[in-house]
Image (cartoon, helix red, strand yellow):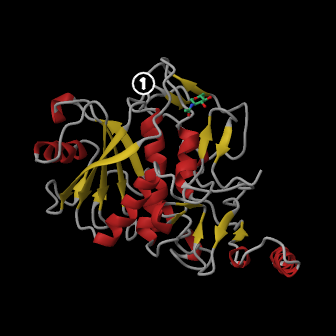
Amino acid sequence: MLIHLLFFLFLVAQSSNGAKSTVQTLQVQPQYINPKLPPKSLSASNKFEGSSDLVNLRYHMGPVLSSPINIYLIWYGKWAASQKLLIKDFLLSISTSAAPSPSVAEWWRTISLYTDQTGANISRSVLLAGEYSDHLYSHGTHLTRLSIQEVIATAVRSKPFTVDHKNGIYLILTSVDVTMQDFCRAVCGFHYFTFPSMVGYTLPYAWVGNSGKQCPEVCAYPFAVPGYMGGGGPGALNTPNGDVGVDGMISVIGHELAELSSNPLVNAWYAGEDPMAPTEIGDLCEGLYGTGGGGGYIGQVMRDKQGRTYNMNGRRGRKFLVQWIWSPVIKACAGPNALD
Ligand SMILES: *[C@@H]1O[C@H](CO)[C@@H](O)[C@H](O)[C@H]1NC(C)=O
């Protein structure tokens, strides 16, 4: 607080000097906070804070998503127009240059540092190529890792949704009332690829569920904190967009897109010896949102006048809180809001 006051006085002094300062330089700066919260139980084993030579992230010779990435969205269940808009604004922010720093596009730059054996980087061009609304729950309100492929098959058989087996990735988002095998207990989202016997092609896909009613303290962390504090009770941070479930999904979507792009066929970038349980570039930084995270701290993030917590800007003035990603260059977790 003191620092902000001094900064303000400095600006006032500048302007009374008749220096070049304008009225805009006096606008309220976001506050920096580094809250300590109970750790997210799910990620505790994978979480890795800071840098280390002990992280043995290796390349296993498979492809990364190096041509322009076409996202096909499947909205499964009931989605409000405002929720769809929020998620689409995040996805469209990845390739926009029209957002102030720290931005979602800068966050994606860490991901685009990954290459495959041909020397091709992960693409910086991420487009929304199609949407399909499965609002009648074509495969019920409980899905499994296998039945999710049926959902994709149903979508790609419909028109105008297409099979884009060159540049397409499929993102299936399930509404708050849909349960999924392992959801909340082991996963908040996952990515894999479809089998030709089920969908007709091998298509990389990711699934993320709205945890708002089922387990926000696990999957919408840090907007709801676990255990004795009870759901969204004291300690939880205010969301940037007013929707605990969907604001929580944004970080999980970012995590899954980063991993899908760097390990689309589960034979490219991961740590650990077991391809059945790979530790990928998002897993290494789960729960970390800024500089100085670790030991229960989430890292330095911003809080605006309305108390909304965020660490990056997107298109149309949007703010998001998205976890950091492991950088292959600095061999540490990295994000656009880094202070060092
Ligand atoms: C591609 O990846 C390499 C290696 O990480 C990096 O040095 C280079 O800057 C990347 N290029 C782009 C366009 O991101």
Residue 256 seen anywhere in this rendered image of the structure: yes
> Dividing the image into 4 quarters, which one contains the N terminus?
bottom right
Asked if residue 224 is positioned above or below residue 131 in the image, the reply reads below
Residue type highlighted by circle 1 = Pro
Q: Quadrant of residue 51?
A: top right
Q: Mark 1, residues whose alpha carbon is within 10 Å: few (<14), some, or many (≥20)? A: many
Q: How far from the left and from the top, in percent, is residue 139?
A: 16, 53
What is the number of callouts on the image? 1
**Along the horizontal axis of the image, is 318 left or right of 70?**
right
Tell me: residue 32, above or below residue 314.
below
Residue under the point 41% across and 54% down: 92
- The correct choice, above or below, for 178 with respect to 96 in the image is below
Above/below status of 13 relative to 337: below
* Horizontal and vertical percent position of residue 41: 56, 57
Q: Residue at x 40, y 50 (%)?
A: 189
Q: Residue at x 38, y 41 (%)?
A: 191
- Name the spot of residue 125 as percent of width and height, x first: 43, 41
Quadrant containing ligand 1: top right
Q: Is residue 289 left or right of residue 122?
A: right
Image quadrant of residue 24? Answer: bottom right
Q: Which residue is mark 1?
A: 63
The answer to whether any part of residue 215 appears in the image is no
The answer to whether residue 308 is left or right of residue 54 is left
The residue located at (52%, 31%) in the rendering is 270
Q: Secondary structure at mark 1?
A: loop
